[in-house]
Image: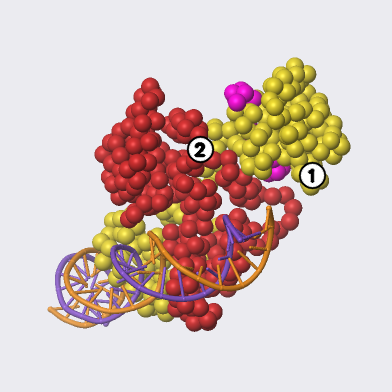
Chain colours: A yellow, B red, C purple, D orange
Amino acid sequence: MTTVLIVDDQPMQRFGFRMLLESQDDLTVAGEASNGAEAVRLVSELRPDVALMDIRMPGLDGIEATRRIVAAGDRTRVLILTTFDLDEYAYAGLRAGASGFLVKDAQPEELLAGIRAVASGDAVVAPSLTRRLLDAFAEKLPKPGEPEAAAQDSRITQLTEREREILTVIGQGWTNSEIAERFHLAESTVKTHVGRILAKTGARDRVQAVILAYDTRLVEPS
Amino acid sequence: MTTVLIVDDQPMQRFGFRMLLESQDDLTVAGEASNGAEAVRLVSELRPDVALMDIRMPGLDGIEATRRIVAAGDRTRVLILTTFDLDEYAYAGLRAGASGFLVKDAQPEELLAGIRAVASGDAVVAPSLTRRLLDAFAEKLPKPGEPEAAAQDSRITQLTEREREILTVIGQGWTNSEIAERFHLAESTVKTHVGRILAKTGARDRVQAVILAYDTRLVEPS
DNA sequence: GCGCTCGTAGTACCCGGGTACGACGCGTGC
DNA sequence: GCACGCGTCGTACCCGGGTACTACGAGCGC
């Protein structure tokens, strides 16, 4: 049996949740809280499996309550609910350590599925927010970027401008064919450049060239 | 009407998907591909709304195919499917730019819902994977407080001790044979480790693994 | 005991990377 | 004029790296 604490400042909203949850055999409502402070207190007292947390509440809001609950190290998982899918709330909620983030206009089945998922240790995010998460991830991908300054290490300065440019993208993980394509060059030309870079810098292969690029700050860790 | 390209090397699997999709009024199968290369070709030719992409395929695998499809800038969204909910694949897939990631043993309704969500621009992730996604995402966010010690990036923490050890020396430019020699291992063993590291982290090759090692501060620029 | 992870090891195969050449056009400086 | 650096391109070749498999013992949890 999964126990749930309902946290919402609107009584009618709490009532709706309670009805929905109690209609399920495997879910039960451990209690209700109408603000963040009460939620924190009830979590430590009732130790529910899941806290269904509204964000907008008078006094201590849902984000801060989540932070405190998570910080307390309780086993209670927090599933945040909001009326709008504003991503700033999502970010804040995730930072606060929430296990999930759903919008209130979700289908009841989605909500129930979310509660069960969170209770079992999984996490859930509303589809409209998942997109943003993935985008944020994608930004971490090695992207074709423009060469930048820095590096007066002699191993670097002896390189020609073109060679430094190519070493920079090697340091960003580009393959020869990618370099060729994006620079509008033949792959053989790229190989020629790479070969000269290795010869001049003393790097054995492109892996060591990458290390050199980092060590000389030609590229910076992200 | 949402058009879907089915990509899977197993004919029976494709058949099953086709039956499921064709039973829906709003979905239609644009075509089928049995490997990654064919998938890339068919996407640019048929321009489906969604590509239902298996990961394990001979030749060009689903991850690389996804990477190319996304890189090509087609409007086609990629929904990755796998038999196991191995998160290493999830990472690689997400980093490749996929719009979703589901496990094959999901309920048909989940799969259909996933396809529709992806087609409409949202993203979906299997619940068992969402947890890790959130953890990883939370780590990327600017945290108030501690100066943030070294590598607790989830791409790193999911590695075993041995794998981190090997990634470290890869980040120092060692070749497989050097690693084998100095660690008293067979080169095949080293290759096995390297392969797992790449799969788990989503790095394409050892060059990107080196970059990852630097970015996560597993190794520091000298 | 059984399933699972982890570390180990092997074979076979393919491909990208690196090397070793040669070649050509374009500037710049002597 | 001519050498030289530089950027471009090509062919041919070899090898290290990566993939796709399979396999097995140790240790651990149920």
- Image quadrant in which the C terminus of chain A is located: bottom right
- Residue at 55% from the left image edge and 38% from the top image edge: A130
- Image quadrant in which the N terminus of chain A is located: top right
In the rendered structure, which segment of residues is drawn in magenta? A95-109
Tell me where residue B70 appears, x and y as whole percent: 39, 45
Of tags 1 and 2, which is closer to the observer?
A: 2
- Residue at 62% from the left image edge and 31% from the top image edge: A113
**Which residue is the site of mark 2?**
B106
Compared across the picture, whether B51 is left or right of D13 comes to: right
Q: Do marks 1 and 2 share a chain?
A: no
Report the front residue among A131 and C25.
A131
Tell me where residue B87 appears, x and y as whole percent: 54, 51
- Residue at 46% from the left image edge and 55% from the top image edge: A142
Amino acid type assigned to the residue bearing label 2 in the image: Ala
Tell me where residue C11 appears, x and y as whole percent: 35, 73
- Residue at 74% from the left image edge and 53% from the top image edge: B145
User: Which mark, residue B92?
Assistant: none
Tell me where residue B203 appears, x and y as whole percent: 47, 59
Q: Is residue B69 above or below residue A104?
A: below
Chain to which mark 2 belongs: B
Report the front residue among B103 and A164.
B103
Measured Cα–Cα span from mark 1 to mark 2: 31 Å
Residue A103 inside the magenta-drawn segment: yes
**Which residue is the site of mark 1?**
A74
Q: Dot 2: what SS?
A: loop
Residue A54 inside the magenta-drawn segment: no
Q: Is residue B202 above or below residue B166?
A: above
The image quarter in which residue B31 lies? top left
Q: Is residue A123 above or below residue A9?
A: below
Dot 2, crowdedness within 10 Å: few (<14), some or many (≥20)?
Answer: few
Compared across the picture, whether B76 is left or right of B99 comes to: left
Dot 1, crowdedness within 10 Å: few (<14), some or many (≥20)?
Answer: some
